[in-house]
Image: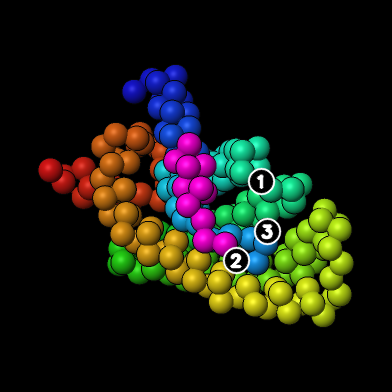
Amino acid sequence: MSKSSSRVRKLVTLAILAALGSALMWVEVPFIPPFKFDISDSTVIIATVLYGPLGGVAVALVKSIVHMLIISVGDFGVGEMVAFVASMSYTLPFYYTMLLLKKTVKNPLLLRIIPCVVGIASLTVMMYYFNIYVSFPLYSLATNTPFTHKEIVAFSTSFIPGNIIKGVGLSIVFLLLSFRLDYIATKYLCDEDECPLIINRTHVKGIK
């Protein structure tokens, strides 16, 4: 396939994932404002698996901007910024862990599970400190709602179980989709030099 065709296919796929991610952000479970749970980050993970970190960043950024323009409720984009950082806190460690493990780990299940565990841990730790030092102070300024440092730490601590649950949920979605995603990516979406996280590419090509 020519480079131009491959580029168009990549852009179309990323656009579809960004649109799907934006739609999934409508299905939210409210928590402490402005933070909500949703499964839209599953599209970010898929984009990252297919096209690397830049693909994941693009999908996460587009869906956050769409959400801010259409759904945001007066927090000046703080919630969307938090959603973007949360996406990256899980997805980037997940990606680089799997990329590193592909050189040594041969078990396809471990090759999927270990990056998920790293992603969950990273999401939990990164968002704890990000909430303390960035998101809650910004939300306080944006909404003119004063918080003491003690309250911010308490709020951030209360988010830890939620971030663990979110990470586990995203991991389960990825694990459910990943084996079929290997086949679809190899057959329809990726050339030989693309999609570095595809596992057992030769084996996948033989699936009917």
What residue did someone put label 3 on? 34
For disc 3, the neighbor class at 10 Å (few under 14, some 14 to 19, many from 20) is some
Which image quarter is the N terminus in? top left
What residue did someone put label 2 on? 31
Q: Secondary structure at mark 1?
A: loop
Horizontal and vertical percent position of residue 73: 69, 48
Magenta stretch: give its range: 19-30
Q: Amino acid at mark 3?
A: Pro
Residue 97 seen by the camera: no
Q: Can you say whether 20 is above or below 9 in the image?
A: below
What residue did someone put label 1 on? 72
Mark number, residue 100: none
Q: Is residue 129 left or right of residue 203?
A: right
State the CA–CA distance, disc 2 to disc 1.
Answer: 15 Å
Q: Amino acid at mark 2?
A: Phe
Query: Which residue occupies the foreground of this view, 192 or 78?
Result: 78
Q: Amino acid at mark 1?
A: Ser
State the CA–CA distance, disc 1 to disc 3.
Answer: 9 Å
Quarter assignment of residue 154: bottom right
- Residue 160 magenta-drawn? no
